[in-house]
Amino acid sequence: MIFIKTIQAHFEKIIDRIAESDNPEKIRESETILMLSLLGPMLLLATVISQIIGVYWQERLIGVLIVTSSLFFCGLFMMILIRLKQPNRLKIHLMSIALLIGLLMTFVIYYERVTIIFWMMILIMIIMSNMMIQRTLFYYMIIGGAIFFTGSLFYYPKASIQIDDAFNLTLLAVLFCIVVASVVTNRIYQQIFVKKSAIYANTISQKEDLNQLYDDVMAHQQQLKAQNELLRLYNTEIEANRERLEFLAYTDTLTGIPNRKMILEQIDLLIDLNKENPHHFALVFIDLDNFKKINDSMGHGAGDLLLKQVTTRLRNAMDDKDLLGRLGGDELAILIRRPISDEKILGDTQKYLNLLGNLFRLDDKSAIITASFGIAIWPVDAKNSSDLLKAADTAMYKAKAMGKNSIQFYRKEMKTEVLYKMELENQLIEAFEKGMFFVEYQPIVELVDQKKASFEALLRWKAPGRGLVSPAEFIPMAEEIGLIGELGEWVLRQACGKIKEVREQFDIDIRIAVNVSAVQMKRPGFLEGIKTVIRETGTPPERLTFEITESVFIGNMEQAIAIIRDLKQFGVMISLDDFGTGYSSLSYLLQLPIDVLKIDRSFIASIEKGEKNNRIVGSIIEMVHGLGIQVVAEGVEEILQFDFLKDKNCDWIQGYLMSRPLGDTAMAEYLLRQRAE
């Protein structure tokens, strides 16, 4: 069984190789091995049969040995030939020659007995060779058959065929071999056909699958093409967005000029370029003076338009090698990248300052604005970009402190001043958050009846480590950092609370004057905020006086007058403070709806020091009385001043002569004395 399974596996392997191969050369090699696998065993079987027949026929021993040995060695040679690694064509020739040798020996020795059998075997070989498409074997069989036939005619002309039982048995054996060979060959080629058909069907299926796959690939290719086009559009959009982001990262969106980041990177680049052979370059820091007033009075749209016009003027006046940038808000910077002397820097900066002093047209409005300039030089004032920017900023703040609309070069001592100011600003914010402010009240005494008094609420701040800070120092700072609105509202609440407190404790109705900053008054919602505080505290409006300065009317006089009229209608009195320090135009007093005018202390201090000064103060009092306005003289510190003012019929006086500013306890004592007298 194992032998049969081995043979079966051998033939199936050869059949699979033939069926599955697409290479004609490989197929021919496999067919040759198949022929050798069939003929080899057949010749070995013929060896056994010829030996039996020879003994049975009592043939000569030498003849039997020749036939059997020839058939055996030919069959063995074919079996060996299967394993030999020889060219296929050589194998076919060797196989055909070996087969002819075996047949020749059999024909020569057993001619008289096996002639018919021989020709039948020749026929088998011809049929098999033709079925196996082995043309070489076919030709060998034809040629060999012709030679054997010719030889038999001349060499054995009178030989007779001996027919007996052995002959019949041999004939049956040959016929059996023919049938077996035919069946085996048929089965082999049926299996080859089945496998070829399966392979063909599989090929057809694969072809259909490939066609479907091709269609799918084409569909996917179209889809990929569409996606690639979409990706290309996305990439184009991404690239445009990248460029846009890069533009936004380095450009100010309002003015279209470089931003702070770009300016700093350009400074760093200049520093790197000048490390080997340094030459000076400068940074000019520009801050527009009172820009917040433009935003507050005209709106942020006007402020944006002003910034655009400012940058346009500066760019048109600048050297092409210089770079203008916006650092933020109303802060600009000019990076002077060319070699230039300090004198030339100052000259160019003065040109920019004069240029910005010209009138700006903001749609249907006009505005005049000034700017403060700070200049820092590399590498004299700083070694890196951030320090250079700080130095220029420090110089600019110094220019503002010197009165604005000016130019300052950086000096090292400026840093100390700026640090002081920054520290004070931080302490100011902290003081407001922690409630460290307090209010004192200075009496304003009526000259006719000195028992009647009103008070001015004065904001005070005692800073840790500094002591009392002058209002002249921290009030402008509060305006600058935007804290003045909150501070003003807080003072108003304190004043309203004090009016109520005095009424409840002493049964006295007092009036308190509260200072209102020009910045505070121009803030949106100012009027509503004032009215809300007065209503919430339950304070009678007629017990309040709002002291304003002439700066309130700068920029938009009509709006300021409208606010004052609204406050007067609400019941509040209006006092014009520090008269004589501003424009001091008596003509516009006719337009102002004020109740009280306070003559500045500088005029009062000059009384009795010159006849001219006396006439000025007297004229002011007389003229203001003519307009129906009461007069308050502030800063009265001497009896001579008191007598002069009383002689000129001044209505009220305020100063150290009458009383210093009073805290809560001192004010209570003052009121008690007034009531006792």
Image (cartoon, rainbow, N blue to C red):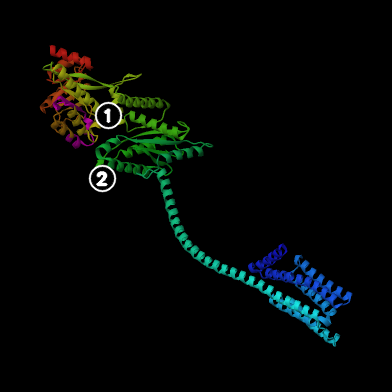
Residue at x 45%, y 58% (from the top left corner): 227
Q: Nearer the viewer, residue 162 or 339?
A: 162
Residue at x 41%, y 49% (from the top left corner): 241
Which residue bears the numbered disc 2?
363
Identify whether 93 is placed above or below 481: below
Q: What kind of residue is marked 1?
A: Ile
Identify whether 317 is placed above or below 30: above
* Eye-nearest disc, 1 or 2: 1
Which residue bears the numbered disc 1?
484
Q: Where is residue 586 in the image (x, y as percent from the top left)?
A: 16, 30
Q: Does the magenta stretch include residue 420?
A: no
Region in magenta? 537-562
Locate the N terminus by quadrant.
bottom right
Q: What kind of residue is marked 2?
A: Asp
Q: Where is residue 639 in the image (x, y as percent from the top left)?
A: 18, 13
Splitting the image into 4 quarters, where does residue 398 fall? top left
User: 648 left or right of 234?
Assistant: left
Splitting the image into 4 quarters, where does residue 529 fall? top left
